[in-house]
Amino acid sequence: MRSLIENEDIRNEDVEKITIWQPSYFAENFVAFPPTSSVDTASSLKYVVGAYMILRKIGVEWYEKYQEIMADPAFKEISGKIEIIKDEGLQALFDKENIVKGKVEIRTRKRVFEKEMRLEELKGNPRNNPMSFEDVKEKFLELAVPVIGEDKCRSFLGSLDKGDPSLRISELMRSLVL
């Protein structure tokens, strides 16, 4: 969904409906809505898509601020337009290869955008589409700075950047201790 939203420059106010087809077994476990705790947010595909549509980035605030996000009128509006479909046909394919499928219907432009994607194509798949070292560092900072602070994060990355083969993992981990 993220790929579709970013590539087509879709604005929330233009969205009429978002439909996501999930393999039936997968969807069975990820349809809980609304989530009742920060832990539940990871098991609610509707929440995850709605939060992405509002924040336009993936990060730790999805979990830390889930109550604020769910109280946001814009979130309530967009999440009301999200439909998750349990797809038996997709399940049969999913047993052989990981496929996701999504559709966004646009009100003002009278257009429908659809995307079917194999999970192997997603950014970050180590076999087919790995993240660059810069991507990994950026993701690390985004997730770790709110937890351990920027100084410790930069120190850790500085140790990695040196590429010192004698660096022991225990020394590296000390730079992350709270």
Image (cartoon, rainbow, N blue to C red):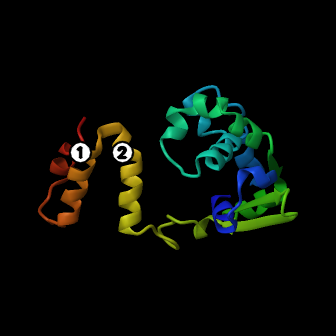
Residue at x 72% of width, y 51% of height: 12
Amino acid type shown at disc 2: Ala
Q: Answer above or below: position of 127 versus 24.
A: below
Residue at x 17% of width, y 48% of height: 170
User: In the visual, does 55 lie left or right of 47?
Assistant: left
Residue at x 73% of width, y 39% of height: 31
The mark found on residue 144 in the picture is 2
The mark found on residue 110 in the picture is none
Residue at x 29% of width, y 41% of height: 149
Amino acid type shown at disc 1: Lys
Quarter that holds the C terminus? top left
Q: Are marks 2 and 1 in contact (CB under 8 Å)?
A: yes
Residue 44 or residue 90, whichever sits in front: 44
Visible in this render: residue 68?
Answer: yes
The x and y percentages for residue 135 are: 41, 64
Of labels 2 and 1, earlier in sequence is 2
Identify the residue under disc 1: 152
Furthest residue to the left? 166
The x and y percentages for residue 22 are: 75, 53
The x and y percentages for residue 148 are: 30, 39
| Residue 133 occupies quadrant | bottom left
